[in-house]
Amino acid sequence: MNYLAEPKQFASWSTDAAREVVLRHKGERGPLLEILNDLQGTFGYIHEDAIAILAEELNLSQAEVYGVVTFYKDLRTEAPGGFLVKICRGESCQSVGADKLVESAQEVFETKLGSTNSERSVTLEEVFCLGNCALSPAIMVDEKLIGRMSTERIAELADEIRGVTL
Ligand code: FES
């Protein structure tokens, strides 16, 4: 099976581009989270220099911005690997073996949840419901949702990723 869609391309970090993203939202009410999501969508992560830009533009302390960045598990402070693999640990997926999938994924991708492997080909993350409960257990590879995942299929996915990153 072909598990991979085109990998998501992120822009390289640039303070000018980041400032543009911030300014786009500046007039909105309580825009911090929206901006952080937009920055992550643009660059793939929240660069450390974004903290100072956000604090300055939104008239917040850097500690306040940093507190929000570190509070939300979905926000990343490091650039992700070539493929972003999210494993669902919501109730439905949990009831049909999500823990086992996590174990296998950590093994085949040689990284821990929340981390990127040493080749930087895969970042492994957990999520809590991908809206695909009928086909649990579910995972997402970049933007592609895959249901009825198994330890065997995780190994096939790893092979496929190896094939395109070698
Ligand atoms: S709990 Fe996993 S898709 Fe809903």
Image (cartoon, helix red, strand yellow):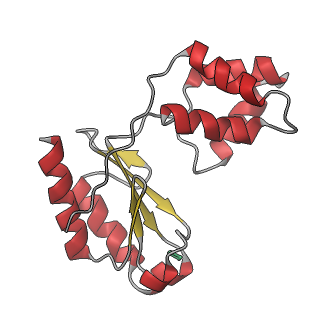
> Residue 121 at what x, y percent from top left?
26, 43
- Residue 155 picture location, percent across and down: 19, 66
Front-lying residue, 165 or 151: 165
Considering every residue shown, the one lying at the far top of the view is 16
Nearest the viewer among 133 and 65 is: 133
Where 37 falls versus 64 (above or below)? below
Image quarter of residue 11: top left
Considering only vertical position in the picture, is 74 above or below 119?
A: below
Residue 58 on image: x %, y %:
82, 24
Determine the residue positioned at 15% across, 58% down.
Answer: 159
In the displayed structure image, the side of residue 91 where residue 142 appears, left or right: left
Total marks placed:
0
Q: Relative to 7, say whether 96 is above or below.
A: below
Relative side of 21 to 120, left or right? right
Which quadrant is home to the C terminus?
Answer: top left
The N terminus - image quarter: bottom left
Picture layout, residue 71 above or below residue 91: above
In the image: residue 31, left or right of residue 13: right
Residue at (43%, 81%) from the top-left corner?
136
* Observer-nearest of 95 and 145: 145
Tell me the residue at 16%/46% (across/down).
164
* Picture residue at 25% right of the left edge, 74% below the top: 151
